[in-house]
Image (tube, rainbow, N blue to C red):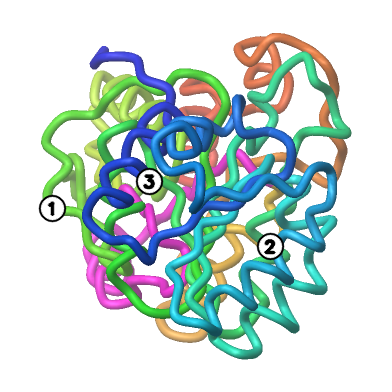
Amino acid sequence: MGELLYQRDIYGQTLVELGRKNKDVVVLDADLSSSTRTSLFAKEFPTRFFNFGVAEQNMMATAAGLASCGKIVFASTFALFATGRAWDQVRNSICYNNFNVKIVASHAGITVGEDGATHQAIEDIAIMRCIPNMKIIVPCDGPETREAVIAVAEKEGPAYIRLGRAKFPTIENKGKFEIGKVYALCEGEDLTIVACGIMVNIALTAAEMLRKENIKVTVLNMHTIKPLDTDTLFKYAQRTKRFIVCEEHMVTGGLGSAVAEFLSENYPIPVLRVGIQNCFGQSGSPDDLLKEYGLTPQDIVCKARKIFAK
């Protein structure tokens, strides 16, 4: 296993890096700057940091206003609050105007753990994906988080980057990060597993387990969910004829839905989804919750056996 890193640590450090290079970078937070690590930026650039308290709607509306004046705005809080509480402002103030606001939300998914259902964002990708102009990125580890933050800073328009709370293992040999461009971490001709975020490392473990059953697997790190890399999906659909899509998110509306929607219209093949099934989360340790909600390597292996039995 590669080095374990907090994605939010990397996010805070990258903000400082960007702030030193560009005086137009400003950072907003909603009373959680210690947890999101925007406090690192606040310490070095106090005049370019704004804390709104528990007022996420106000934060997003102000982010839109600052972007309209030429600022590159990073707005951060927990994923549930960034997407759920402030959806109106994200849609109407930021995305409708195609403003240069980067929403980087931490504590996404069920691996928030003991904070429980009220703090576990498992619908956030779905409600961001349906908004025009919004880009959605789910990095798989710390280094990819840095690359994603730099990439959205250099690209005009709104973006949503989804980060976890727990430490993620660093994945080697990922290739160059590019928004909207997926890459294969391993190649096999029998089955393609598409994954994002924490599920990428879990998918790689499952691929190793399946290899022992003589099933050769391609694993795609689908870090960008919108825009979707349809060319690569089409190529691997032709090659392997079977897909399993894995995400720490509801199976409805997220990565699995995006992949299934594309394939059903362009190259229909069997697609099974590994994700949370139409229910809320609950309190527990991250590892226990991954087991409870069927997000382990063993669960992916079971899906693979099922897809070959069809």
Per the model, the C-alpha gap separating discs 2 and 1 is: 27 Å
Q: 234 and 83: which one is in front?
A: 83
Magenta residues span 221-249
Label 3 or label 2, whichever lies nearer to me, is: 2
Q: Amino acid at mark 2?
A: Ala
Task: Point out which mark residue 176 bears.
Answer: 1
Q: 268 and 287: which one is in front?
A: 287
Which residue corresponds to mark 3? 193
For label 1, the SS is loop
Residue 228 lies within the magenta run: yes
Left or right for 233, reference 167: left
Which residue corresponds to mark 2? 126
Per the model, the C-alpha gap separating discs 3 and 2 is: 20 Å
Q: Give the vertical position of 80 relative to 303 (above or below).
A: below
Q: Which image quadrant for residue 219?
A: top left
Position in image of residue 90 (x %, y %): 70, 71
Dot 3: within a 10 Å radius of its alpha carbon, few (fewer than 14), some, or many (20 or more) residues? many
